[in-house]
Image (spheres, rainbow, N blue to C red):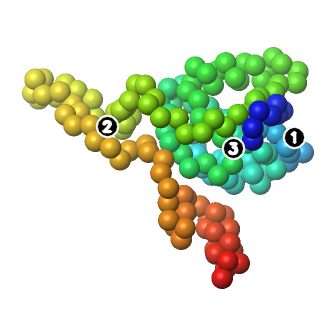
């Protein structure tokens, strides 16, 4: 998508399954042709886009963190146009969608962004210091590459192990032969 203004849906229902974008929770009549705002949590992040939003005929996704997930952003191999935002930005978007009668969103692909600051960032699941037994030892003591990095993947492996993607990958590979 390039410089397109699109309708934005936040399918908040009576329970949290719709705003969490769980399987079967989105109404295709509401979502069709729209970018869907999904709250992070409960199910796989790629599943929200590839399975839930796409199967409901949505054309893109904004994945917003909640108070439980905070500001940490994780790199995902989303297979439809998508953007991940922290809790603060997510709260602003949620409020906009609730108060605007015809909410819209602009998705513009600007290519790969490098030299993002702050970088490198210690993964959220890494231990933090100082060490409880020896306070002079700070943690983490080493920051190494390999976590939260998007990269290419081999043709026969794919970016996710979701069954729906694997079935699609198998079909594509069979058609190429």
Q: Quadrant of the N terminus?
A: top right
The answer to the question of whether label 3 and label 1 lie on touching residues, with beta carbons closer than 8 A, is: no
Q: CA distance from mark 3 to mark 2?
A: 29 Å
**Front-most of residues 29 and 74:** 74
Of badges 3 and 2, the one in the foreground is 3
Please determine whether, in this image, residue 159 is positioned above or below residue 117.
below
> Residue 102 appears at what percent x and percent y?
88, 24
Q: Please say whether residue 79 is visible from this viewpoint.
A: yes
Residue annotated with mark 3? 81
Mark 3 → mark 1, Cα distance in angstroms: 18 Å
Question: Which numbered disc, 1 or 2, marks the residue that appears first in the sequence?
Answer: 1
Where is residue 42 shown, x and y percent of the image?
58, 43
Q: Can residue 17 be spotted in the picture?
A: no
How crowded pointer 3 is (Cα within 10 Å; few <14, some 14-19, many 20+) is rated as some
Q: Callout 3: helix, strand or loop?
A: loop
- Find residue 9 and report its image quarter: top right
Q: What kind of element bears circle 1?
A: helix
The quadrant holding residue 33 is top right
């Amino acid at each position: 998508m390039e410089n397109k203004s699109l309708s934005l849906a936040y399918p908040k229902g009576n329970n949290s399954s719709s705003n969490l974008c769980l399987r079967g929770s989105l109404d295709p009549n509401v979502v069709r042709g729209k970018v869907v705002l999904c709250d992070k949590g409960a199910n796989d992040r790629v599943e929200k886009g590839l399975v839930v939003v796409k199967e409901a005929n949505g054309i893109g996704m904004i994945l917003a963190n909640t108070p439980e997930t905070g500001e940490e952003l994780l790199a995902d191999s989303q297979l439809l146009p998508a953007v991940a935002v922290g809790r603060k930005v997510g709260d602003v978007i949620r409020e906009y969608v609730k108060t605007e009668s015809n909410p819209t969103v602009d998705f513009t692909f600007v290519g790969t962004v490098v030299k993002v600051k702050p970088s490198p960032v210690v993964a959220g699941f890494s231990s933090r210091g100082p060490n409880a037994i020896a306070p002079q030892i700070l943690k983490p003591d080493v920051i190494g590459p390999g976590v939260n990095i998007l990269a290419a993947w081999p043709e026969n492996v794919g970016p996710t192990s979701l069954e729906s993607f694997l079935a699609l990958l198998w079909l594509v590979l069979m058609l190429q032969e």
